[in-house]
Amino acid sequence: MYVPQVIREFIRCKVLRPILRLLRGGVTPRRMAWSLAIGMVIGINPSVGLTTLIVLLLAWIFGLNQLASQIGLHIVAPLHLLLFLPFIQLGVHLFHTRRLPLDRHQLEHLSHHPVLMLHEMWRWEWHALVVWAIAAVILTPLLAIYLRRALVLMMRRHKTLLQTLPAAQ
């Protein structure tokens, strides 16, 4: 698969190098994997505007690496946008609630009833969060296992970078 040079360089500079610096600084692959996994799973949750705060709080509570958690969060930012509606739709399907108003007439009706709109929005959000939580319980350990393996392979591949002293920046 062809990946444009600009994207490869961006991933190398903004993702791989910071992770290698953390590994070189003494963060274990296991701790790094869990930090990345927590950031990635929280990053796809269907809430809007709370992901950074939630990741900071969870990384602090569990003693994970803050920077790695933020890297994981920002890696999946595009997925957050792509998965927002599917989580809501799955919640609607799972809890048998009213479908999302996606046409103009339904949106106009809700806009004239702000209390009803808030109630419906909260219900959709709550159900989407339940669906996400179920997925998160399954995804987080699996993601941590595979990320740890990838980090160990990356450490073996870049052994010389890990043995050098961290560059002052």
Image: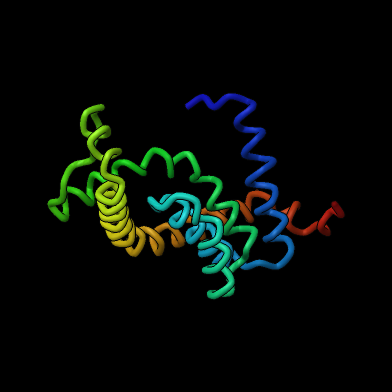
Figure quadrant of residue 111? top left
Residue found farthest to the right: 168
**Location of residue 130 in the rendering, given as x and y in whole percent from the top left corner:** 28, 60
Q: Residue at x 43, y 56 (%)?
A: 41
Residue at image coords 62%, 63% = 66
Vertical placement of residue 89 versus 135, above or below: above
Q: Give left or right: position of 157 versus 75.
A: right
Residue 87 in view here: no
Left of 161 or right of it: where is 89? left
Residue for point 47% across, 39% down = 78
- Tell me which residue sits at (63%, 55%) in the image: 155
Residue lying at the far left in this picture: please name it: 96
Q: Residue 37 appears at what percent x and percent y?
A: 48, 59
Residue 10 in the image: x percent, y percent?
65, 35
The outermost residue toward the front is: 112
Q: Is residue 132 visible from the viewing direction of this image?
A: yes
- Provide residue 153's location: percent of width, then percent of height: 56, 53
Q: Nearer the viewer, residue 101 or 50?
A: 101
Q: Is residue 105 left or right of residue 71?
A: left
Residue 132, relative to residue 76: is it above or below? below
